[in-house]
Image (cartoon, helix red, strand yellow):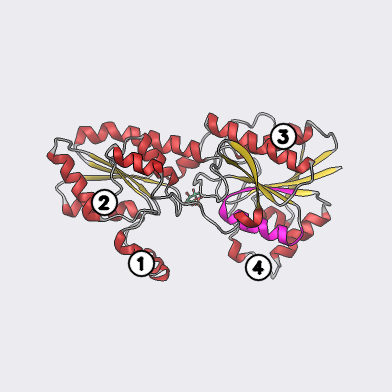
Amino acid sequence: MLRIGMLTSGGDCQALNAAMRGVVKGVCSKRNDVEIYGFQDGYKGLIYGNFEMLSSKDFSGILTRGGTILGTSRQPFKLMRVPDANGLDKVEAMKHTYHKLCLDCLVILGGNGTHKTANLLREEGLNVVTLPKTIDNDLWGTDMTFGFQSAVDIATDTIDRIHTTATSHSRVFIIEVMGHKVGHVTLHAGIAGGADVILLPEIPYDIDEVVHVIQNRSKVGKSFTIIAVAEGAISKEDAKLKKKEYKEKIANRKYPSIAYELAEQIQTRTDKEVRITVPGHTQRGGSPCPYDRVFATRMGAAASELILNKEYGYMLGTKNGKTIKVPLQDVAGKLKYVDPECGLIKEAKMVGISFGS
Ligand code: F6P
């Protein structure tokens, strides 16, 4: 008997179901003695022993479905060693569930925080295989994560729709794009949507430069400006602050997010009307784009191969178009940032996009 525990953890994204389907189809095509334990709402299900026994049928017809059939939740890594309200040791509880069910391995789909806990479980002696999910595409060790391309499509569509109204009204439009501490989604959607200014966490911006771009565009008869700003974008001034000081500043800021702060600054320095669009969680919603369906299927199939070969302790990923396995200890705790010196940024600048620096 091959007993596989499966869970999806952290923020959801498109193609989680496609990836799980890939794992199950791959394993079940080679063995007919497979039991699948689907843990509900991520690590929470593993901690409290909430699971459902699933069969390969449960993974049919879900290739195109968004969200996750298992449910998910955020269980911060830094609290994993902190007992819960009833004094339960969460790590010991997860190990207990694993051993009680006599699992051969856990398949964990997640992003950065999820990988830290997956690595902890590996260190505690559990067999773990992970799959790279997140719209942010910030997982170290892989060129791509599933969810990213779908989110780029949605953010691009938002910018496309703003374009026509921005031109009609001669306004400045700010579109705030998700991505947590990195700017991959904003960079790609910004270029694809023809944004005039793209502001990323990796390239601190100067508000004077942003204003300068808006005014220069006006001078040459372009009365509107589209700004794609990453939710984690930071000004040059704020980038000089110590981490703690910056955290305090953010906690006390009067604006709900960066787009609102920028809008006020632009409004007071120009004669332009400014409008804000925040697509928010729509960027994680709906069905996966074809790229993500294919990529997640590849990752799932590759994971099934590792499971069948009893090769544990790896995250599946891709490098230069090839599927790779990356040791979990190498992935855990690292972020993949946008390289400000990369070719994409250089080429974007060549076509006139400003990064506000
Ligand atoms: O990590 C995915 C992500 O969508 C980030 O881009 C964003 O910062 C965060 O999750 C939002 O988290 P939540 O869904 O918990 O509000």
Residue 14 place in picture, x, y as percent: 55, 38
Identify the mark nearer the N-term, 3 or 4: 3
Gap in angstroms between the C-alphas marked 1 and 3: 47 Å
**Magenta run includes residue 60:** no
- The residue stretch that appears in magenta: 106-125
Q: Main secondary structure of the magenta part?
A: helix
- Secondary structure under badge 3? helix
Note whether 74 is above or below 302 in the view shown. Answer: below
The verdict on label 4 being within 8 Å of ligand 1 is no
Note whether 1 is above or below 86 in the view shown. Answer: above
Q: Amino acid at mark 2?
A: Ala
Identify the mark nearer the N-term, 1 or 2: 1
Q: Are marks 1 and 3 in contact (CB under 8 Å)?
A: no
Gap in angstroms between the C-alphas marked 2 and 3: 47 Å
Q: Amino acid at mark 3?
A: Asp
Report the residue marked by disc 2.
263
Gap in angstroms between the C-alphas marked 4 and 1: 29 Å
Report the residue marked by disc 1.
249
Say which of 255 and 244 sits in front: 244
In the picture, measured across the screen, residue 199 lies left or right of residue 30, that is left
Report the residue marked by disc 3.
58
Q: Quadrant of the N terminus?
A: top right
In the picture, measured across the screen, residue 176 lies left or right of residue 334, that is left
Task: Please name the residue shown 61% across and 40% down the image.
Answer: 16
| Label annotation for residue 81 | 4
- How many discs mark residues in the rendered view? 4
